[in-house]
Amino acid sequence: NAEVPDEWRLSEVNDGLPYMSRVFSRHSPTTATFGLGIARAAYEDAIDYAKGRVQGGSPIIEHDEIRERIADMYVSISVARDAIWQAAWHADNAAEGEYDHKEGMRVKIFASDMAPQVCSSAMNIFGGTGYMTTHSAERHMRDAMMCYHIDGLNDTVRWKLGRLIAGEKFAGSI
């Protein structure tokens, strides 16, 4: 039970939640970078593995199915990266009261949905060894699943995003 002198308060008494919402409302693009980074690491590890794993007399990176999987991973990561850059620019440059929360919410949802999909593809490239805790693919998948829970569950963020799109306002944290 700490007493905070009035001159040290950042906001009025009982105004903490709205204050925190204003302070943290623009951090969703940062949260989205977690999923992007995890997906990128899984993608790079999968490429390295595919270059070194020989099956049927050739590295598996020369197999069409592996190339298609890697191409899909690349597209997902690139789209997420571009969307995050756009949302981050908007968060940095929007005037006070002009920030569109939908920007950050969409990239949080997209990147944290994309990361497990990319990691699953990486695990499939690794084959059975991808599920072993001694390989990076398994760790990347565990890390990617964590992204659903950072900055609010994706279902909760979708619910809030849907309400904003519908024009509904609500109190509390974005």
Image: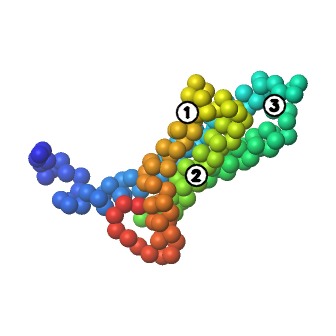
Which numbered disc, 2 or 1, marks the residue that appears first in the sequence? 2
**Count of marks, rendered view:** 3
Which tag is nearer the camera, tag 3 or tag 2?
A: 3
Label 2 Cα neighbours within 10 Å, binned few <14 / some 14-19 / many ≥20: some
Residue 155 coordinates in the image, percent (x, y): 48, 60
Q: In which quarter of the view is residue 122 placed?
A: top right
Q: Is residue 29 visible?
A: no
Which numbered disc, 1 or 3, marks the residue that appears first in the sequence? 3
The residue depicted at 66 percent of the width and 37 percent of the height is: 123
The amino acid marked with disc number 3 is Ile
Q: Is residue 128 above or below residue 83?
A: above
Q: Which residue is mark 1?
A: 139
Q: Secondary structure at mark 1?
A: helix
Q: Which residue is mark 3?
A: 60
The Cα–Cα distance between marks 2 and 1, rounded to whole angstroms, is 17 Å
The amino acid marked with disc number 1 is Arg
The residue depicted at 26 percent of the width and 57 percent of the height is: 16
Left or right: 168 as drawn, with respect to 21: right
Residue 60 coordinates in the image, percent (x, y): 81, 31
Q: Which residue is mark 2?
A: 113
Colour basis: rainbow
The Cα–Cα distance between marks 3 and 2, rounded to whole angstroms, is 27 Å
Judged from this view, the residue extending furthest toward the bottom is 167
Q: Is residue 133 above or below residue 79?
A: above
Which numbered disc, 3 or 2, marks the residue that appears first in the sequence? 3
Q: Secondary structure at mark 3?
A: helix
Residue 72 coordinates in the image, percent (x, y): 74, 47
Query: Is residue 13 or residue 36 the one in the foreground?
Result: 36
